Amino acid sequence: MRTERWIILASLWAVVAGGCARMNRDPADCFLRETDVERYEHGLVVCLSGAGGMMGETGNIRQGLIDGGVECAIEVFDWSTGVVLIDQMDLDANKRKAKALARRIEEYQQGYPGRPVHLVGVSAGTGLIVWALEDLAPGRHVESAFLIAPSLWHKYDLSAAMQELEGRLYSFYSPWDPVLALLVPVFGTVDRINGVSGGLRGFSPPDKADGRTKAVYESKLEQIIWESKDAVYGHIGGHLGATQPAYVSARIAPLLKRPKRTGVERNALALAQ
């Protein structure tokens, strides 16, 4: 058993240390818009990879969303330097890139008012999604956000980000994720905490959360734990399992296509907060 553990660690280290550096790119120029122009009329989905950006996860997500009948334009924010540890640990750079994501959302909403925007991120990329939501200009909102295997600390205060959502924040987690179980406790979460990530345990409100914060968690956060039945879609509990096209098509696309909240629902939520 000990030998198997070291084999797993050695294999994961090879992934962590790898990557082709893309360190001098301007984040504002990293939105890959390989999508039909007509799709922008239906809304926008922006996908973010995990640290390293080399496992094809955004391509898989894009294919799964298309297979699942999502009609929105699908862009990829190619934020990664190509080096896993830099992506995971460079907090200042990641927050600058998150600002570029926020500006892209605002740019799209300026050109296509009233259309929904959705964000889908993997592992370290989920941190950029949360920070981008926190950085949106007043009056700008996103319809929904999807955090796949988030490497954010499990008690990171998500309330400010969730208040910028018209719909919900969906978090997909697995207690069997080897990357989050073995490596993140060593190298730290993307928000630079040496603790358990939300992608491994699920998120919970901060220890000293007030009633308003708890209400936001209750109304806005929907967490989806890995189950053995998900294996039929190619997700066997691992770090990138929820990015498999079949899983995205069956489990994520229907959530993304949920109808927007009615005015009555929004008013009820505001009163609850």
Image: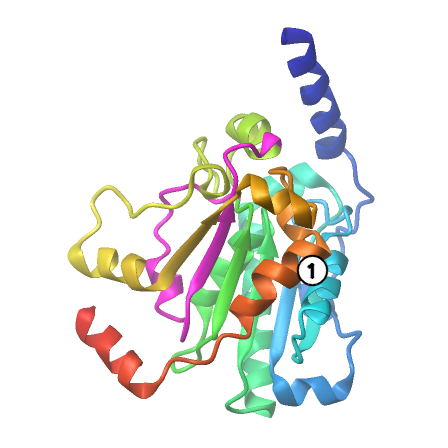
Which residue in the structure is indicated by mark 1? 61
Q: Which residues are magenta?
A: 151-178
Where residue 28 appears, as percent x and y from the top left, is 68, 69
- Residue at the image position 67 percent from the left and 74 percent from the top: 69
Q: Is residue 60 above or below residue 72?
A: above
- Residue at the image position 67 percent from the left and 21 percent from the top: 9
Where residue 11 appears, as percent x and y from the top left, is 74, 25
Residue 161 is covered by the magenta coloring: yes
Q: Quadrant of residue 154?
A: top left
Q: Is residue 218 left or right of residue 227?
A: left
Q: Is residue 233 left or right of residue 221?
A: right
Residue 167 is covered by the magenta coloring: yes
Q: Amino acid at mark 1?
A: Ile
Where residue 48 appears, as percent x and y from the top left, is 65, 59
The secondary element bearing badge 1 is classed as helix
- Residue at the image position 64 percent from the left and 15 percent from the top: 5
Q: Is residue 212 above or below residue 53?
A: below
Where residue 142 appears, as percent x and y from the top left, is 48, 74
